[in-house]
Amino acid sequence: MSDEGVGLGRRRRPLVTALAVASSVLVLDQITKHLAVSRLADGDVVHVVWTLQWNLAFNSGMAFSQAGGLGPIIGLAALVVAAVVVSMARRAPDTWTAVAAGLVVGGALGNVVDRLFRGDAWMRGAVIDFIDFQWFPIFNVADIGVDVGAALFILWSMTRGRRRTTDVV
């Protein structure tokens, strides 16, 4: 194989990693939401451990149920963010950055799928939330993906500057 083929493979690896992680988060999110709707639709609340319970809720707004009714705008913004992060993932400098990108994209798309297909009009669906600690707003697997991915991006950006400083010294 020529050096050009190896270089091309290395350039594609971060994108493949990001898309694999995004697909995994999206599938896991949709499976858990399907289970939540099918098992909790009658109003049941299932105690898990300590304050954790499964409790079905529908959110037509954004985080912490703010901006209800702005679902189409929030959904479009999430699609734009996902597209930008995917385009950036092609140039991810390491695996952790590609994983972070995949988590954010998978989570964003998981909630967009709800807005697209769980309502009576385009982008008018409500996001399904079911993970309830009772002392924190109810959330879902997609939200976990976005939050963990964002945290990894923040950690990466903080350590990147530190690595550059120590590399120079």
Image (tube, rainbow, N blue to C red):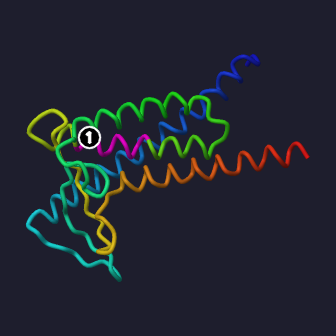
Q: Position of residue 64 (x, y in %)?
A: 29, 58
Total number of numbered labels?
1
The residue pinned by badge 1 equals 113
Q: What segment carries the magenta color?
A: 105-114
Q: Residue at x 17, y 58 (%)?
A: 37
In this rendering, the answer to whether 102 lies above or below 128 is above
- Which residue, as the protein is rendered here, is positioned at the far bottom? 50
**Mostly what secondary structure, the magenta segment?**
helix
Quarter holding the N terminus is: top right
Q: Residue at x 82, y 46 (%)?
A: 165
Q: Is 84 placed left or right of 64 in the picture?
A: right
Q: Nearer the viewer, residue 137 or 120?
A: 137
Q: Nearer the viewer, residue 159 or 15?
A: 159
Q: Nearer the viewer, residue 142 or 6?
A: 142
Q: Is 162 placed left or right of 21 in the picture?
A: right
Q: Secondary structure at mark 1?
A: helix
Q: Position of residue 74 (x, y in %)?
A: 28, 39
Task: Give the image quarter of residue 13.
Answer: top right
